[in-house]
Image (cartoon, grey):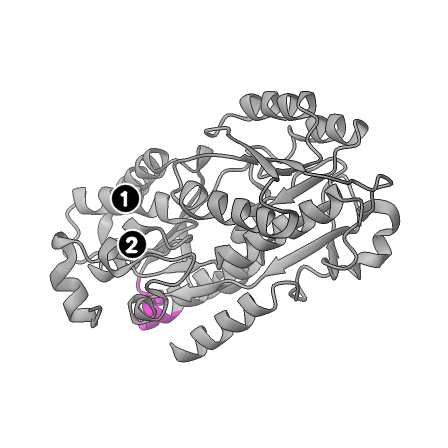
Amino acid sequence: MNSHLRRAGVAMAAVSMATALAACGSAKEAGDNGEQKKDKKGPLTIGLLLPENQTARYERFDKPLIEKKIKELAGADTVVLYENAKQDASVQQQQVDTMITKKVDALIVDAVDAKSIASSVKKANDKGIPVVAYDRLAEGPVKAYTSVDNERVGKIQGESLLKELGDNASKGKIVMMNGAITDPNAKMYKDGAHSVLDGKVEVGKEYDTKEWKPENANENMKGAISSLGKDNIVGVYSANDGMAGGIITALKSAGFDKLPPVTGQDAELSAVQRILSDEQFMSVYKPYKPEADAAAELAVALAQGKGTDAVAKTTVDSGTQKKIPAIIVTPFALTKADIGQYVGKEGFFTLNEICTEKYKAQCDQAGLK
């Protein structure tokens, strides 16, 4: 537990350090990819496009943290134009068009659909607007990218699940509930998890969940229970917390005497409370502040025509582009034992938010006071 906290501190203090898994060289190797010819003077206008509002993190953490850092870096008179696509790729494409019309100096985009956004990224680039891909690696001529080490997320989930299963790993099957195929991160989570789970536990059923929606995960889980039989399911790999909620509802409805361990990701408030209640086994805590700070640093540097060499120290490849300057942040496992270490910290929840009257007994038992 304490080692997790120490490592989290290192990640937050040294956001520009990249993981070996994401590294493809230095940002300098990207040449002009991270540089703008203009030398912007005066107040900036920066666009911010986030993909959806079902996952609480985007409105609660990402948006305010990015806005705050942009203004710290570029001045209080900087204008941040914000839109949320609400999980609609065509709406997000229209939002990019709007940002181009408003002549933003840089654009931060967390893509709903990493492939379909490519043409919009090209439009912006053709108009001299540099695009920073945030959290998900959008295709097209993006100038920079920041995210967590996504394959590591899947490995953490898989490792945690195997550890919790112990000898039970050989006594049944697991269900894998992966994310949406339109999200490139989902494949990295899945690949990371499989690298740990394959050969150690049998996967009875596996799904790619449309739009990451909890209700779709719920229906998939019902199908898995019907197909495999509840007595044969020893654990569930869920790629994120929203889907974990839908999965757990299905498990409860099926009458499990004891819920099998269910993983998650994002450390959402409802998931933290489920972990305290022993309904969800774990989540993955992704330090939002360093990721948000990185997006702001990249966007401001590009908007000011300074390029990214001073900020991004590694590169990644997308399906359409090589050696994109990048900043990668390290994620951490979050179990009941870890919650107390993060309560009240920036990018996490307060004691009052977690320990409502409904969860008072669980909080007391966990020593959260």
Residue picked out by circle 2: 233
- Magenta-tinted stretch: 163-171
Q: Depth check: give the residue in front, 128 or 334.
A: 128
**Residue type of the residue flagged with mark 2:** Ile
Q: Identify which residue is drawn at 68% across, 31% down.
A: 104
Circle 1 — which element? helix
Q: Identify which residue is drawn at 47% across, 45% down.
A: 64
Q: Tell me if mark 2 has few (under 14), some (14-19) or many (20+) residues whose alpha carbon lies within 10 angstroms of its own.
A: many
Q: Quadrant of residue 367?
A: bottom left
Circle 2 — which element? strand
Image quarter in which the N terminus is found: bottom left
Q: Depth check: give the residue in front, 123 or 297.
A: 297
* Residue 129 position (above or below residue 310): above
Give the dominant element type of the magenta stretch: helix, strand or loop: helix
> In the image, 172: left or right of 94?
left
Q: Identify which residue is drawn at 55% across, 33% down.
A: 112
Q: Depth check: give the residue in front, 231 or 290.
A: 290
Residue 193 in sight here: no
* Residue 118 position (above or below residue 262): above
Image coords of residue 258 (percent x, y): 17, 58
Image coords of residue 3 (percent x, y): 44, 79
> In the image, 182: left or right of 308?
left
Residue lying at the far bottom of the rendered structure: 2
Residue picked out by circle 1: 225
Residue 20 in sight here: yes
Residue 165 lies within the magenta run: yes
What is the number of the mark on residue 9?
A: none
Image quarter in which the C terminus is found: bottom left
Residue 133 lies within the magenta run: no
Whole-number angstrom distance, CA of label 2 to CA of label 1: 8 Å
